[in-house]
Amino acid sequence: MAFKNFRINIILRVLILTLIIGVLTYCLYNELFLRSIYVAITLIIIITELIRYVEKTNRDFTSFLSALLQNDFTTTYAEKGKGKTFNELYIVFNQITNKFRSISEDKEAQFIFLSLLVEHVRVGILSIDDSNQIHLINQSMRSYLANTTARNLTDLPHPEHEIAKVFQSIKVGENQLVKKTVNGKVIPLTIHASEIWLQGQYFKLISAQDIHNELEANELEAWQKLIRVLTHEIMNSVSPIISLSSTLHHLVNDNKSNQELNDNEKATLQKGLEAILVRSQGLHHFASAYRSLTKIPQPQFRKVQIINIIERLTTLFQEELNSKGIELKIDVADNNELLADPELLEQVLINLIRNAIDAVTGQANPWIIIKTETRQPNTSIIQIEDNGIGIEPSQLDKVFIPFFTTKNTGSGIGLALSKQIIQMHSGQISITSQVGIGTIVEIKL
């Protein structure tokens, strides 16, 4: 062990070097030239070996750094026998190596875990860079893309070019619904995109989820709600018609033997027929309103200044607002512009303002606020807020159902029509409300 000690080795080499120098001096002094040559050669060898030994620490340090640089964490160093300072140095070397090995193992384990997680989820996941190079794709996404092994979106087979264009064009934060044929079956996919920067490189992360079951469940629920509303409205009209028709039928049958009805019977018959006429007209109006939901014209998109629409609506409602003491507040930027059908969008805002007026009528200090803002690039928000009576929580999820209304005189198609128009603009409309506080309707386009 002592012969491994750095200091002892240096001392021994220095002593040997001193001895050889002394021998060389003696030989030269006594003119022993041949022996002097041999001793000189030995002196050079000793000096070279001393330098090599001293530089061993530098070689060990270089080897240590090279191993780290190449992610090689298997190299270890003897921690005893070379002296206290060297023992401490090699202990630190080994500790650093073990630490990097631990970090590498944790990183590898985390990578394996995330890889298994990405493969396990049923949502298709795809990561591409700004040149459409594919960096990550899980099995679910492969199944949507005919189990492709392509490394770039441009290399996808021809049948997948359409969905590839969606992946390339979809904007960050945007959702798109795409119908995709997989194994001869058409499935609806909701596509969502986000972005991430890693070490200065841009990546777009795209997810694709099969929402067939959710759409079927929502569609069934929507049909059930619609059927309940339609049944309720139709039965409200048909039941009294049947009852009244039965009464009139009995009235006529009871007077078959008489050639002429008396005045009371005529009055009863006339009132009954009038009631049937009015109720039938109401049922016809109801059916016409339902038909209007299916005959919305396709939007004719063009650039629209929201402030211009708001100013026209303010003029339209100003007299009614003044007569009811309702304060209208406008917070709309002059340069707020979006792509929309101005006539259809104006119809939506008319419905919403009309609802707000009805909600605040009779309230203390009634007010309505119309404001807009831009939250993301190319995304405009329109909000209509009021301090009206609010909507019961149990009714809030039904307000967009056709013919459902919380008002005594409402038709129940205004919000349903508005939602359909906004969806035709690829937008969203939502309502938040608290009873006794007010309601906020938000349109996102």
Image (tube, rainbow, N blue to C red):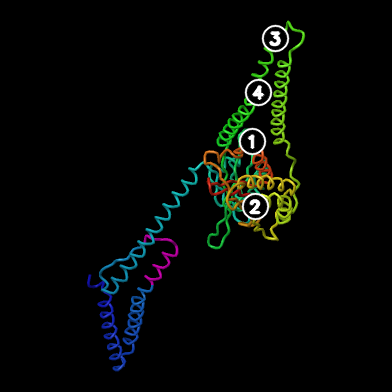
Type of residue at label 1? Pro
> Is the residue 120 above or below the residue 274 in the image?
below
Q: Nearer the N terminus, badge 2 or badge 4?
A: 4
Determine which of the numbered discs, if any, sits on residue 325 in the image.
2
> Main SS type for the magenta part?
helix
Q: Position of residue 183 (x, y in %)?
A: 61, 34
Q: Position of residue 47 (x, y in %)?
A: 34, 81
Q: Residue at x 75, y 51 (%)?
A: 302
Type of residue at label 3? Asn
Q: Position of residue 71 (x, y in %)?
A: 43, 61
Which is in the foreground here, disc 1 or disc 3? Answer: 3
- The quarter holding residue 358 reads top right
Q: Nearer the N terminus, badge 3 or badge 2?
A: 3
- Does residue 359 show up magenta in the picture? no
In this view of the protein, which residue sits in the foreground, 310 or 238?
238
Type of residue at label 4? Val
At mark 3, the secondary structure is helix
At mark 1, the secondary structure is loop
**Can residue 243 be seen here?**
yes
Q: Quadrant of the N terminus?
A: bottom left
State how far apart marks 2 and 4 are (Cα).
41 Å
Most extreme residue toward the front, as rendered? 263
Instruction: Give the magenta-colored segment's residue range.
Output: 59-74
- The quarter holding residue 18 reads bottom left
Q: Nearer the N terminus, badge 2 or badge 1?
A: 2
In this view of the protein, which residue sits in the foreground, 444 or 249?
249
Residue of label 4: 238
Which is in the foreground here, disc 2 or disc 1? Answer: 2
Residue of label 1: 402
Q: Nearer the N terminus, badge 4 or badge 1?
A: 4
